[in-house]
Amino acid sequence: MENDNKTKVNNILSDLIEILTVYGTVLKVGEKWNGKKHNIRFNKEIESINKNLIVRLQYNSFDIMFKINNYYVVGGCINSCYGDGILQDGFFNFGNFKQRVMSQKENILKNIKEIKEQMNKVESLQKRKEKIKKELEEHNSNINYYINDIYNLKIK
């Protein structure tokens, strides 16, 4: 079971690293489209970068999503919404797009760092969880039903 969990974490890390490698090319495509009207060709050009990229256009916004093994990689999506300046009246603004991509890149790097740090202390985190769980059960078991009904003292 533990090896399965480590494999899952390593898969997530490799997905996040793959997203980082793709972002450079996404930026190059975005720069080419600066000032141009956003259309299906933009979507196809982005999707051609990597088989896991999906672009969805809706109204005056779009999503660039990273999908691996039928799940969307959280934190790997680049979203544009109406009024954020990436699509201004349908025209692509590379400066705002680059800002969004770089922000996502920072978030991914932060996630990678946190995952690696927490992987090194999973055992202590599990022990801490069990200790807190035991304290919680003890706390809840000592509270009278009627007192809890009035004061809401049990922890859920």
Image (cartoon, helix red, strand yellow):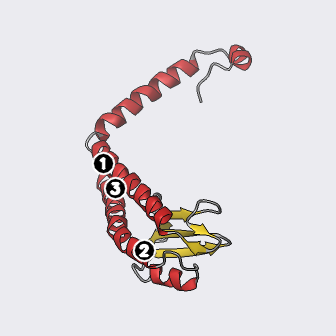
Check the image and report above or below for 47 versus 20: below
Identity, as a three-letter code, of the amino acid under mark 3: Val
Task: Tell me where residue 92 appears, x and y as whole percent.
Answer: 54, 73
Q: CA distance from mark 1 to mark 2?
A: 29 Å
Is residue 58 in view? yes
Residue nearer the viewer, 153 or 61: 61
Q: N-terminal of the two: label 1 or label 2?
A: 2
**Residue found 40% across the figure and 59% down from its top:** 102
Of badges 3 and 1, the one in the foreground is 1
Q: Residue 139 at what x, y percent from top left?
A: 53, 18
Picture coordinates of residue 115 (x, y %)?
Answer: 33, 48
* Secondary structure state at the residue bearing disc 2: helix
Task: Give the side of residue 42 with respect to residue 12, left or right.
Answer: right
| Quadrant position of residue 127 | top left
Tell me which amino acid carries mark 2: Glu
Q: Secondary structure at mark 1?
A: helix
Residue in the foreground of this view, choosing between 26 and 48: 26
The CA span between labels 3 and 2 is 33 Å
Residue drawn at (57%, 20%) of the image: 141
Q: Give me the disc on residue 113.
A: 1
Q: Residues within 10 Å of mark 3 (few under 14, many from 20)?
A: some
Residue 1 visible in the current orientation: no
Give the residue pinned by disc 3.
9
Residue found at x 29% / y 55%? 3
Q: Residues within 10 Å of mark 1 (few under 14, many from 20)?
A: few
Residue with the mark numbered 2: 31
Quarter of the image where the C terminus is located: top right
